[in-house]
């Protein structure tokens, strides 16, 4: 199959071939003809790196009526990075399509400039949900003429707490449009969006559902928590030329691991939510240019990163939310390449491996952390290879050659080889001279006796339950985090994944933080209701004890209630939240 057979116009084909795409990927081949021809909703399920942007971008550009000055297509995506990336791709695809104007709108950037760009006649908007809403409220965006709406990385958007924002944006688009939803995974929440907002969608699935790309080797090793950093270093040293991302659960851990690596002489840096946008851009640019060998990132910060040639993804910890595993490992093996995903697992969490295996539909291979000897062997061979391959700049060194010979004349060839090798290699010999075996013997990991596992199959020591949720006016996870940090004095760094429900929430926390939160928060109140925080050791059972709320329906009822009444109740809640904030 070639791009020529898909029904695209010559302007687009020219741009595509200039970009260097030769044959359409599977999702492109299956989607483009449908999206060009059929006036209907669509769901595309495919792993990251399979070319979804062009799958929706090409037919979208094709169907813009450039004689008509209005926004005709909207692409919503979870992060600023992704937003910029998609806009850039769409611009490249439409290089020869006259009159196409793509504008990216995202937070953390000058809004007036974005408004000016929109006014210059944008017909395609690529936006993050937050900024898009902001611009709708400022009357700078009008979606009355939108006929194509794309929800890209729908699962990620929901993971990040954009459900309400998406609902609101969808309400500002006309009913006759086509909605195209793309996702790597299809959790219940995405199914709900699909059933609420789409009509008889055409569904395309590429690869197995919820599995990650085929050319990733999924592996894990067993090490104690205290040895994780050393394990990471050994894997890095064992793969000269590796270029990778290490994922951590919390911002603090991202910072700590990156700092240790830098201190130990690696080209590493951290990417997490505590950095300003400008700092994040700097880190990402360094990584993109491969000036960094290892990026240490939290899940949220690394979402949607599309950097080619990532060889390794490390999981310093498995994510709280197992679905994130797919997104993490999908950062490698992009565009048909292969890659390795390695999870560093402590014995206490070994049973979570099974959850990952269920998620990706594949076994993870247990591997050993390389020994000091293995690493020295690999590094030595790499050094020798480099010496063999290096190009000698004869002219450049000519003026010094006589002097060099004079200095080294007393050494034999054998001695010289040993000395030159040692210059580079002593570092590794020294690091690994006393390196022991840090692997935990898998037969010693007790099955079913997992300290952190509980009846619901979730870890509990690192997860707390709190009896506040959306009904208390928290519109998103960030607001809840802000409130909890304010009230308890803990640092946002030490909080990982947050699950915000209607009347309660869960938070992943660093070691020791759970106790702090419990001590600090219990006894405080919110709207005359006692706040209760406890270690999460069972599944939420809907409303938990002690709720006294007038006029609040149960969580299930709210979803199906009429749009009008729901909006009112959420609006009220938000106002309360803001007032409360001011008072405190
Ligand atoms: P996804 O959205 O599925 O994660 P992207 O659309 O970001 O994937 O594409 C991943 C990479 O593959 C990008 O670098 C993109 O330029 C490249 N790519 C997409 N389609 C093709 C193609 N048909 N041939 C070659 N490379 C492609
Ligand atoms: Mg994508």
Image (spheres, grey):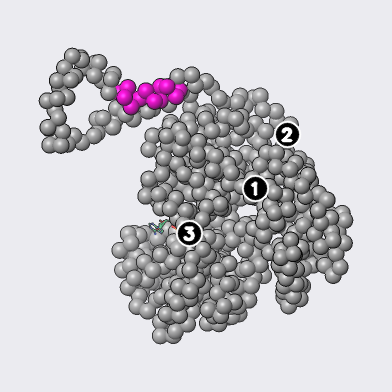
Specify the farthest residue to the front.
Answer: 583
Identify residue for label 1: 491
Of marks 3 and 1, the one in the foreground: 1
Is residue 448 one of those drawn in magenta? no
Identify residue for label 3: 81
Give how far apart the Cα atoms at labels 3 and 1 are: 26 Å
Disc 3 residue crowd, few under 14, some 14–19, many 20+, Cα 10 Å: many
At 53% from the left and 39% from the top, the residue drawn is: 257
Where ligand 1 lies, by quadrant?
Answer: bottom left
**Residue 419 screen position, x and y as percent:** 28, 20
Quarter of the image for the C terminus: give it. Answer: bottom right
Of marks 3 and 2, the one in the foreground: 3
Above-or-below relation of 542 to 93? above
* Residue numbers of the magenta segment: 421-432
| Residue 362 in view of the camera | no
Secondary element type, mark 2: loop
Magenta segment, prevailing SS (helix, strand or loop): helix
Above-or-below relation of 294 to 10? above
């Amino acid at each position: 199959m070639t791009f020529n057979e898909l029904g695209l116009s010559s302007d687009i084909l020219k741009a595509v071939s200039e970009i260097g795409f030769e044959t359409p990927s599977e999702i492109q081949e299956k989607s483009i003809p449908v999206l060009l021809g059929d006036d209907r909703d669509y769901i595309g399920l495919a792993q990251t790196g399979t070319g979804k942007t062009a799958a929706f971008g090409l037919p979208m550009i094709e169907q813009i009526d450039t004689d008509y000055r209005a926004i005709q297509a909207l692409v919503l995506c979870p992060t600023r990075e992704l937003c910029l990336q998609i806009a850039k791709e769409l611009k490249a695809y439409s290089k020869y399509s006259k009159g196409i104007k793509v504008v990216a709108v995202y937070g953390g950037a000058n809004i007036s400039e974005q408004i000016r760009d929109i006014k210059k006649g944008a017909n395609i908007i690529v936006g993050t949900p937050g900024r898009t809403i902001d611009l709708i409220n400022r009357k700078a965006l009008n979606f009355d003429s939108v006929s194509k709406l794309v929800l890209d990385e729908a699962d990620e958007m929901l993971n990040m707490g954009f459900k309400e924002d998406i609902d609101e944006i969808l309400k500002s688009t006309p009913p006759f449009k086509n909605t195209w939803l793309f996702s790597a995974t299809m959790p219940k929440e995405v199914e709900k969006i699909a059933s609420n907002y789409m009509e008889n969608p055409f569904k395309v699935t590429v690869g197995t559902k919820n599995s990650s790309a085929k050319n990733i080797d999924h592996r894990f090793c067993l090490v104690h928590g205290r040895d994780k950093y050393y394990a990471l270093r050994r894997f890095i040293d064992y793969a000269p030329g590796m270029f990778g991302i290490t994922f951590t659960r919390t911002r603090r851990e991202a910072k700590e691991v990156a700092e240790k690596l830098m201190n130990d002489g690696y080209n590493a840096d951290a990417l997490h939510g505590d950095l300003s946008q400008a700092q994040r851009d700097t880190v990402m640019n360094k990584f993109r240019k491969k000036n960094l060998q290892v990026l240490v990132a939290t899940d949220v910060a690394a979402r949607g990163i599309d950097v080619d040639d990532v060889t390794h993804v490390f999981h310093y910890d498995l994510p709280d939310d197992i679905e994130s595993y797919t997104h993490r490992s999908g950062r490698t093996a992009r565009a048909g390449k292969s890659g390795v995903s390695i999870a560093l697992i402590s014995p206490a969490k070994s049973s979570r491996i099974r959850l990952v295996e269920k998620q990706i539909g594949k076994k993870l291979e247990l591997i050993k952390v390389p020994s000091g000897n293995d690493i020295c062997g690999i590094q030595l061979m790499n050094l020798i290879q480099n010496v063999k391959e290096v190009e000698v700049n004869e002219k450049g060194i000519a003026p010094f050659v006589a002097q060099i010979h004079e200095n080294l004349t007393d050494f034999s060839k054998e001695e010289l080889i040993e000395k030159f090798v040692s210059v580079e290699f002593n570092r590794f010999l020294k690091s690994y001279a006393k390196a022991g075996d840090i692997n935990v013997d898998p037969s010693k990991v007790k099955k079913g006796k997992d300290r952190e596992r509980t009846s619901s199959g979730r870890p509990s020591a690192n997860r707390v339950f709190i009896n506040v949720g959306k009904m208390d006016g928290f519109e998103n996870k960030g607001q809840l985090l802000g409130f909890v940090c304010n009230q308890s004095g803990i640092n946002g760094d030490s909080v990982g994944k947050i699950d915000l429900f209607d009347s309660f929430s869960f938070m992943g926390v660093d070691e020791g933080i759970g106790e702090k939160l419990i001590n600090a928060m219990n006894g405080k109140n919110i709207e005359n209701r006692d706040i209760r925080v406890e270690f999460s050791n069972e599944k939420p059972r809907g409303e938990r004890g002690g709720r006294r709320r007038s006029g609040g329906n149960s969580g299930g009822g709210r979803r199906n209630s009429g749009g009008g009444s729901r909006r009112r109740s959420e609006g009220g809640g938000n106002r309360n939240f803001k007032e409360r904030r001011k008072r405190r």
